Image (cartoon, rainbow, N blue to C red):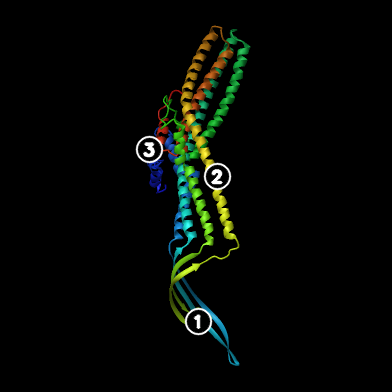
Amino acid sequence: MYGVKQRAFSQRRGLSWVSLAAVTACMMLWPLRSFALDFISAYRSALHKNPAYLATQQQHLAVQEKRVQGRGGLLPTLSLNYSQAYNWSEVEQQSGANRYTEDRDYQSHNASLMFQQPLLDYEAWSGYQKADQQAQEADDQFLGETAKLALQVLTSYTQAMLARDQQVLAEQQLAAHRALLHQNESLKAQGEGTQTDVLETQSRLFLSETEWIEAQDALDLALRTLAQMIDLPVSLADLPELTSFQASLPLDSSELAHWQRLALQHNPELLALAHREKAAEYEVSVQNSGHYPRLSLYASSRRTESDTENTYEQRYDTESVGIQLKVPLYLGGRVSSAAREAQAIKSQVSYELASKRQEVILNVRRHLQKCISSVSSLKARRFALSSSEALVTATRMSVQGGERGNQDVLDAERQWYQARRELARTQYDYLQAWLALHVEAGVLQDAHIVLVSEQFRRVSKNI
């Protein structure tokens, strides 16, 4: 399923880059459903079933054949040609003053065996080097797509969980507003409440109903998106809860220079573009080779019988060994034009590589900053949630004492639900940023995927 030269790639890069074989083995040994749809199960399913990824896999296999095809231009060729024909011929001949006609009905045979070995072929050599670079580019692209798939699955996975959390919170908020409205109406009927309290709560109730409907739609879309990504049916019961982790996920370093250096050395997209640039350079050589001579060794064995009119009823057995030299003299400027075109494409790829380097450096900075800032953000979000919970309790007590009104309770509850939503969103964003940092730096390993999956193993009572 995966490239057989993965071990060579890891050694070449000097880093334990994500081993596709190791990841696959890990996926196979992991239980399909440990308690629900865990992240590893989702990722494994995507590896085997996601159509876009499978298309990339087949593209990788197809490009690998270019190396074989390029090598074929350097190896000897052996060909056999055979022909047999039935001929009906009318021959007019002049002999002195006499002309006579002869009808010839005969069979002709022609068999030849040709061996040819290039001795000097700059186009074939450059073509092989280009094909080798294209195959290496496909290797790096496939590695990159495999790592990106993990991030794509995690994104869909956490978006479904976030949508589930939003729907639960919207449902809880709706139930709370309904209970508060019932309380307001009861107090009004007893002469202890006001119509203003009822109207305020009704307004919030209508808003809660709208948010609940939107949350339902978002949850349905998120579940369908995840199911399409991994090609497995996904229900609400399949989604786990996120562990309310207190400590930050491990980072090899918090230094930006460290991660940028790793990315410049190991990012699969950069490595792929570097190979594409080298392939474009060899393409320039391929086009320039139109100016160079070609020299080849050949040997042939030929058997003919009545092959032409001039060899009627004659048989020839011919063995030949020699060299063949082909020297281009003038091709109307086509070679020079093709070489200039190839040079322009090579320059284009060089600029694309420079642009991608800038993009990767910026992405690494963004993901690292997100990882670092999320640790503080999570602490702040948890504190905000605790404060909002305490505020709701205090506000309700103040209402009973006549110090606060119904609107204050609604505002406090609204703040509490928002704090819960933001905490959940920050946790999911943190996981995505942490995994994206390792993907962008080109150092994603199967251990990282397992570590992310472990964040969903325990059921947390707190969102």
Residue 22 is situated, as x and y percent measured from the top left of the image, at: 38, 42
Q: Secondary structure at mark 3?
A: loop
Q: Earlier in the sequence, mark 1 or mark 2?
A: 1
Residue 381 is situated, as x and y percent measured from the top left of the image, at: 49, 22
Q: Earlier in the sequence, mark 2 or mark 3?
A: 3
Q: Which residue is mark 2?
A: 351
Task: Assess disc 1: are there few (<14), some (14-19) or many (≥20) residues with their C-alpha within 10 Å of its C-alpha.
Answer: few
Q: Earlier in the sequence, mark 3 or mark 1?
A: 3
Cα–Cα span, label 2 and label 3: 43 Å
Residue 21 is situated, as x and y percent measured from the top left of the image, at: 39, 44
Q: Secondary structure at mark 2?
A: helix
Q: Which residue is mark 1?
A: 311
Give the residue drawn at x 49%, y 43%: 270
Amino acid type, label 1: Thr
Give the residue drawn at x 50%, y 36%: 361
* Nearer the camera: disc 3 or disc 1: 1
* Nearer the camera: disc 2 or disc 3: 2
How many marks are shown on the rendered structure? 3
Residue 421 is situated, as x and y percent measured from the top left of the image, at: 51, 24
User: Residue 185's image quarter?
Assistant: top right
Seen as rendered, the residue at the extreme bottom is 97
Q: Is residue 120 visible?
A: yes
Q: Which residue is mark 3?
A: 30
Q: Secondary structure at mark 1?
A: helix
Amino acid type, label 3: Trp
Q: Nearer the viewer, residue 145 or 349?
A: 349
Residue 120 image label: none
Amino acid type, label 2: Tyr
Cα–Cα span, label 3 and label 1: 76 Å
